[in-house]
Image (cartoon, rainbow, N blue to C red):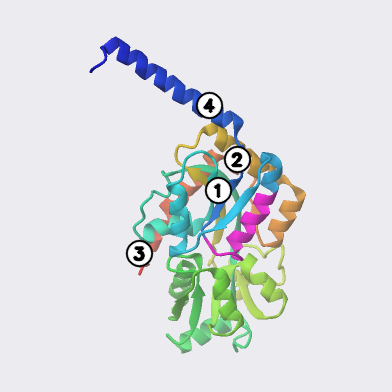
Amino acid sequence: MRLPSARWLQFATAMAVSIAFSSATAAQDYPTRPITMVVPQGAGSPLDTIGRILSERMRVSLGQPVIIENVAGAAGSIGVGRVARAAPDGYTIVIGIWSTHVANAAIQPLKYDVLNDFEPIALHGTNPQVIVARKSLLPRDLKGLITWLQANPDQATAGTAGVGSPQHVFGAFFQNATATRFRFVAYRSAAQAMQDLLAERIDFMIDAQANALPQVRDGRITAFAVTGKMRSAVAPEIPTVDEAGLAGFHFSVWNATWAPKGTPKTIVGQLNAAIVEALADTKVRTQLVSLGQEIFPPEQQTPEALHAFQKAEIEKWWPIIKAAGIKAE
């Protein structure tokens, strides 16, 4: 039986008001239970470390635990995809990096849109990478490494966290910049690749400072150069690529957080405030800086700034990645 148009309009209006009221009430009460932060990399990875530092401080602001869940695989797309499909209620968020929210979409078909299927929350930090090698490798500086690679094409092995990971993409750029050829060895995470570098099963990596510097300080691997324009504040003894003989070979990997598309703006605002407070905390800043992180200034920690920054990175890197022919296997 069809309702008369006037009654149907009243019914539809009442339903819309009810849904809006329920959503507003839920947002007002948020959070009432623990929040899950998905880390699309393995436990012990650089991103995992950053996520755990932030989540611990976010608990103070939100009044609820922020639980880390590692969902590794497919260069991070499994974990990110899970959050894209999650309920937009603020109880599932993802911490990602340049590869998960920029590079992956240029390398493999995804079931989500890296820019439009998420609500940006906040940019955290960025850090130059460091070129490191197994301890017994004879070259002792970057020029020596390049010369050795040129003299031994396709013989050396470089560890990566999978196809399209920063280690892979930047390694491909390294090949082009130095006219060298070497084989990539893919792992499920950067931490696993580092374990094989320490065991001398692979020759070198271009890796995050958070993953590499502890091993460098312990004298277990050799550091050749950082990829920033300036020396790292936490490892000033390591030369820049410009100083080491590979001028202009600059890049950094940034990290940020997102919620599923449709998450209420009030909830996004609460999550953003918790992260901004964490990034302003002296203890958190000290921990992040010790990992080689350069924290974004407050004006770049907004959801709007993250959206604009991510869009610009996509416009910059997608053509470069596609021109390099990097594709998922």
4 vs 2, front mark: 4
Q: In terms of depth relative to the viewer, which is nearer, 288 or 74?
A: 74
Asked if the magenta segment contains residue 325, the reply would be no
| Res 14 → quadrant | top left
Are dots 2 and 1 in contact, CB under 8 Å? yes
The residue that disc 4 covers is 24
- Disc 2 is placed on an element classified as helix
Give the residue type at disc 1: Thr
2 vs 3, front mark: 2
> Secondary structure of the magenta portion, mostly?
helix
Q: Position of residue 125 (x, y in %)?
A: 61, 53
The residue that disc 1 covers is 257
Rendered position, 60 above or below 7:
below
Are dots 4 and 2 in contact, CB under 8 Å? no
- Quarter holding the C terminus? bottom left
| Res 121 → quadrant | top right
Give the residue type at disc 2: Leu
236 relative position to 169: left or right:
right
Q: CA distance from mark 3 to mark 1?
A: 28 Å
Give the residue type at disc 3: Ala
**Which class describes the residues within 10 Å of circle 1: few (<14), some (14-19), or many (20+)?**
many
Are dots 3 and 1 in contact, CB under 8 Å? no
- Disc 1 is placed on an element classified as strand
Asked if the magenta segment contains residue 44, the reply would be yes
Task: Look at the image and give the residue range highlighted in magenta.
Answer: 41-56
The residue that disc 3 covers is 323
Q: Earlier in the sequence, mark 2 or mark 1?
A: 1
3 vs 1, front mark: 1
- Disc 3 is placed on an element classified as helix
Q: CA distance from mark 4 to mark 2?
A: 16 Å
Disc ID at residue 181: none
